Amino acid sequence: MMGTNTDSSMIQDSNGAFPGDRKITVVFVLGGPGSGKGTQCSKIVENFGFTHLSAGDLLRAEIKSGSDNGYEAICFLFNCCTFSTMISNMIKEGKIVPSEVTVELLKKAILESGNNKFLIDGFPRNEENRSTFENVTKLEPEFILFFDCSEEEMEQRLLGRNQGRDDDNIETIRKRFRVFIESSLPVIEYYDQKGKVRKIDAMKPIDDIFEDVKAIFAVFPAKDE
């Protein structure tokens, strides 16, 4: 059974970023690129009423917006003319975007949502992401949903899909694998030591995977209840 942590689910930001009495439940969703996180998140949203926030999608949306978004100082440090250009360049290199940037985008999305249950997909990608998120939001995740899949399988899935993403080429895919292994696995190990990791065999067919996911989310009321 999963434990709950009501105290840590209460965001009480001294700067007023979140209403102090708003109970927020966050589940981090981690797995290598192509592990099927997005597909399963859609099913969780449909069945359990969570809001799906993809760190990658938020960053890509920011790139398309062409916005400076108040981050002129960061843009200067990275020798980029706009905030969106900085993010784009880092993603193309397979690098991790500065934690402050991603956390601010996530915080904004949570603030603008009317929901109080969130799946944060593809985050935290490293220890700095994790500590920045917890320090800024005063929130710890309820648990980590970890989709475990072999690199060979993930590579085939990514090369076979047709989503029109600029970073779905073999060179960038392999860079993303290396970043995940070097940076994200330590985060999973950190939360595993706290008993918060829920590991899913992501090599199975999609429907079989979701049966395992449903068992983990059984502590939350189904959407139609």
Image (spheres, helix red, strand yellow):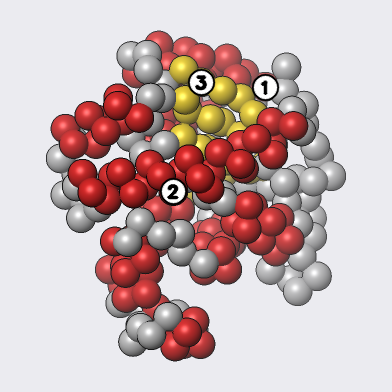
Can you give x and y, in whole percent of width and height, for residue 103 in the image?
57, 62
| Disc 1 target residue | 219
Residue at 33% x, 14% y is 205
Q: Is residue 80 above or below residue 42?
A: below
Mark 1–mark 2 Cα distance, whole angstroms, equals 33 Å
Dot 2 lies on which element?
A: helix
Residue at 46% x, 35% y is 31
Type of amino acid under label 1:
Val
Local packing at callout 1 (Cα closer than 10 Å; few below 14, some 14-19, many 20+) is few
* Proximity of marks 1 and 2: CB atoms separated by less than 8 Å: no
Q: Is residue 92 above or below residue 211?
A: below
| Near-viewer residue (50 or 61) | 61
Query: Of discs 1 and 2, which sits in the foreground?
Result: 2
Circle nearer the N terminus (2, 3): 2
Can you give x and y, in whole percent of width and height, for residue 149 in the image?
41, 25
Residue at 46% x, 17% y is 201
Type of amino acid under label 3:
Ile
Can you give x and y, in whole percent of width and height, for residue 106 in the image?
54, 59
| Disc 2 target residue | 179
Local packing at callout 2 (Cα closer than 10 Å; few below 14, some 14-19, many 20+) is some
Type of amino acid under label 2:
Val
Residue at 31% x, 69% y is 89
* Disc ID at residue 49: none
* Residue 85 placement, left or right of 115: left
